[in-house]
């Protein structure tokens, strides 16, 4: 996936136990893998909660590029492609950045 400096784009990551993981950029499928499994038994770090992008769960953190996030939305269900497109359109046409 190619990021363009100085441009906004919308990422959607959705996962289902049988469908796997799908990454969308601006409602276009960029990558997918059916071989991604849920990790169970993880402990919540209440002293230093974090949100990691681009590294396996439980691996040590390393410096990475800076990015800005305008909003974060979490859905309780897997998004099929048609719904990813609807979410993208909603945020694209209603954003005020």
Image (cartoon, rainbow, N blue to C red):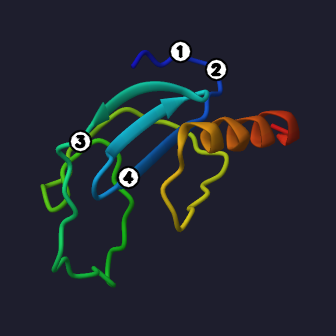
Q: What residue is shown with label 3?
A: 34
Query: What numbered label is drawn on residue 4?
Result: 1
Residue tagged by mark 4? 15
Determine crowd level at label 2: few under 14, some 14-19, many 20+ residues with C-alpha closer than 10 A.
few
Q: Secondary structure at mark 2?
A: loop
Residues under labels 1 and 3: Cα distance? 28 Å
Mark identifier at residue 71 = none
Image quarter of residue 45: bottom left
Q: Nearer the viewer, mark 1 or mark 3?
A: 3
Q: Earlier in the sequence, mark 2 or mark 3?
A: 2
Q: Looking at the image, is mark 1 or mark 3 earlier in the sequence?
A: 1
Gap in Å between the C-alphas at discs 1 and 4? Answer: 25 Å
Foreground residue, 96 or 62? 96
Whether residues under marks 4 and 3 lie with C-beta atoms below 8 angstroms apart, the answer is no
Q: Which mark is residue 7?
A: 2
- Marks 2/3: CA–CA distance: 30 Å
* Real-space CA distance between mark 4 and mark 3, rounded to the nearest whole angstrom: 9 Å
Q: Residue 2 vs residue 57: left or right?
A: right
Identified at 60% across, 55% down, the residue is: 72
The answer to whether the residues at label 2 and label 1 have Cβ atoms under 8 Å apart is yes
Lower sequence index among marks 4 and 3: 4
Q: Residues within 10 Å of mark 1 (few under 14, many from 20)?
A: few
């Amino acid at each position: 996936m190619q990021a363009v400096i100085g441009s906004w784009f919308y990422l959607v990551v959705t996962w289902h136990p049988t469908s796997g993981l799908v990454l969308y950029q601006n409602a276009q499928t960029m990558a997918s893998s059916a071989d991604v499994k849920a990790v169970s038994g993880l402990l919540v770090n209440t002293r230093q909660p974090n949100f990691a992008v681009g590294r396996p769960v439980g691996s040590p953190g390393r410096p990475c590029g800076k990015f800005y996030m305008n909003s974060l939305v979490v859905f309780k269900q897997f998004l099929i492609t048609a719904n990813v497109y609807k979410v993208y359109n909603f945020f694209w046409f209603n954003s005020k950045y």
